[in-house]
Image (cartoon, grey):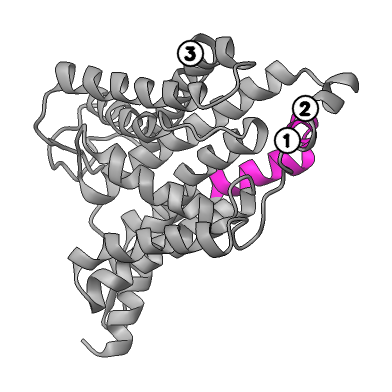
Amino acid sequence: MTFADLLLQQTINGLSLGAMYALLALGFTLVYGILELINFSHFNVFMVGSFVGLWVLQQFGLSGQEIVLAGLPLVGVLLAAFVVTMGVSGGIGVAIERLCLRPLRNVKGPAAMITTIGVSYILFNIVLLTVGADSKNYPNPVPAIHYHIGGAVLDLRVILIWIVATILMLGLYFFVQRSRLGKAMRATAQDAEAARMMGVEVDKVIIMAFFLGSALAGAGGMIFGLYYNFTSFLIGFTAGLRAFTAAVLGGIGNVPGAMVGGILIGLIEAMSAQFLATAWTDVIIFSILVLVLVFKPSGLFGRIAPTKS
């Protein structure tokens, strides 16, 4: 395989990883843009979402490493799995906001952020105690169809991942930009009190931010399972930190920035693993996090919301 073929193959791999990180990063950026809160429970909402997707696929009779559907339409099965996974994950996000964070809304200091860390560990241990510590094989309902581009290989599974991620990201972007509730979210991000005086239901906006962010995290968790063909109670930490780095790189609070940041982090991970060594991947990614925070804390695109006093 020539250098150009290697570069193309890692670009394909990086875009797949980037799609997953972008979906997860959007959850961080939606919540931060409105509440200026880093929601660390988001890490393990992603992990729970991967298990919900696994369970839904198993309900269709798929288990282990099966790769062929038994008379069921591929699109219908995947659509059902993503809808249920996103709905459950979004519900978890709403429950976290209503039960754990809303009582702390007016409490100054790091109490709310520390609470999200506690919630994250609750989710982590619930899955550990109920599902177990072993990695679970993820069903692969997508036929093993490969397309050769020079020396690089593009799988049908990867194409479907790109399509799903693109639809979700564009759907969120147009929702935020064009819908009435999306405009209310942007107004709340700019100035919550002014938005409230103009008739915006701020509590409803916050709930929607948590629901959408958590739903996208669930979709990202299912993409993780479909891409790697396994899931585990441990996957939230590493993927979450990389997605957080993506959100910071793009400009946390900025929706397009989170998308671009996710794609960049995915490409950086794939390229560093191929041309340096996998062991150096975390060094490079978290060095980017430190450098961005030190030298350009607003990220590549800047934050949407100004700092609130």
* Badge 1 vs badge 2, beta-carbon distance below 8 Å: yes
Which dot, 1 or 3, sits closer to the camera? 1
Query: Magenta span: helix, strand or loop, mainly?
Result: helix
Type of the residue with mark 1: Lys
Q: Quadrant of the C terminus?
A: top right
- Residue 242: where, in percent of width, then height? 38, 51
Type of the residue with mark 2: Ala
Task: Say which residue appears at 76% left-offset and 43% top-offset.
Answer: 177
Q: Which residue lies furthest to the left in this view?
A: 134
Identify the residue under disc 3. 100
Q: Which mark is residue 21?
A: none
Identify the residue under disc 1. 308
- Residue 66: where, in percent of width, then height? 15, 41
- Residue 60: where, in percent of width, then height? 26, 26
Circle nearer the N terminus (1, 3): 3
Disc 3 crowd, CA 10 A, few/some/many (<14, 14-19, 20+): some
Q: Residue furthest right?
A: 198
Type of the residue with mark 3: Cys
Identify the residue under disc 2. 192
